[in-house]
Image (spheres, rainbow, N blue to C red):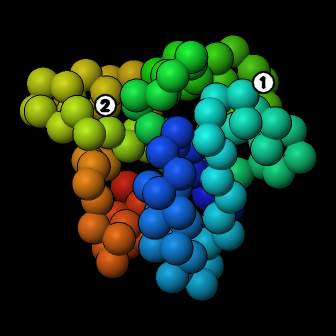
C-alpha cells in the first residue's frame, strides 16, 4: 500500500513515517504542504493519502477539494489527521469525502493498524 502523509509539522511527519514504516506492506512518502504533495503525486501515485487538516496556505479540506477536481485523484482515499478532535468537528471532517479521521496526537505504535482499519 502506497501512503502519502501530508503535514506541515516536520516532527509529526517524521514520527508518522517511522510509525507507518513499521508495516512492511506500506511504502511511505511525505510532503510538507499541499504544493509539495501535488509535486510528489505527479511522480508517485499513492493508494491512500493522510492529510493534515490545519496547514498554512492550502489546508487539508481545500487540498481534498482540489484533488476531487482532478481525474487522476478523484477517487483517491483520504484520511484526515487533525488536532481538532471534538466530536462535532470529527463528524464535519468525516462528511468531507474523506474515508475517516484520525485524531492527533496519534499513537505511533497503532497508526499503521488504524490506517488499515479505516482503509478497509
Q: Point out which mark residue 71 bears.
A: 1
Please report the residue visible at 46 percent of the width from the left and 66 percent of the height from the top.
15
Please indicate whether residue 44 sits to the left or right of residue 3 in the image: right
**Residue at the image point whose x is 62% and y is 57% from the top:** 3
Q: Is residue 13 visible?
A: yes
Where residue 80 appears, as percent x and y from the top left, is 40, 39
Please provide percent x and percent y for residue 29. Answer: 68, 58
Which image quadrant: the N terminus? bottom right
Which residue occupies 53% across, 63% down?
14
Residue at the disc numbered 2: 94
Q: Is residue 60 rendered to the left or right of residue 38?
A: left
The disc, 1 or 2, on the residue closer to the chain's N-terminal end is 1
Q: Position of residue 4 (x, y in %)?
A: 63, 52
Instruction: Find residue 2 and report its image quarter.
Output: bottom right
Vertical position of residue 108 compared to residue 43: above or below: below
Compared to residue 28, the image places residue 22 above or below, namely below
Residue 20, placed above or below residue 24: above
Front in this rendered view, residue 17 or 43 = 17
Amino acid at each position: 500500500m502506497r501512503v502519502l502523509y501530508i503535514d506541515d509539522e516536520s516532527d509529526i511527519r517524521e514520527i508518522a513515517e517511522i510509525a507507518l514504516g513499521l508495516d512492511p506492506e506500506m511504502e511511505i512518502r511525505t510532503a510538507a504542504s499541499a504544493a509539495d504533495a501535488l509535486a510528489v503525486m505527479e511522480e508517485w501515485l499513492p493508494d491512500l493519502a493522510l492529510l493534515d487538516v490545519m496547514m498554512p496556505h492550502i489546508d487539508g479540506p481545500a487540498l481534498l477539494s482540489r484533488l476531487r477536481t482532478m481525474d487522476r485523484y478523484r477517487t483517491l482515499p483520504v484520511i484526515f489527521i487533525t488536532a481538532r478532535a471534538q466530536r462535532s468537528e470529527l463528524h464535519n471532517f468525516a462528511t468531507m469525502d474523506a474515508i475517516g479521521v484520525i485524531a492527533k496526537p496519534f499513537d505511533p505504535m497503532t497508526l499503521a493498524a488504524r490506517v488499515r482499519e479505516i482503509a478497509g
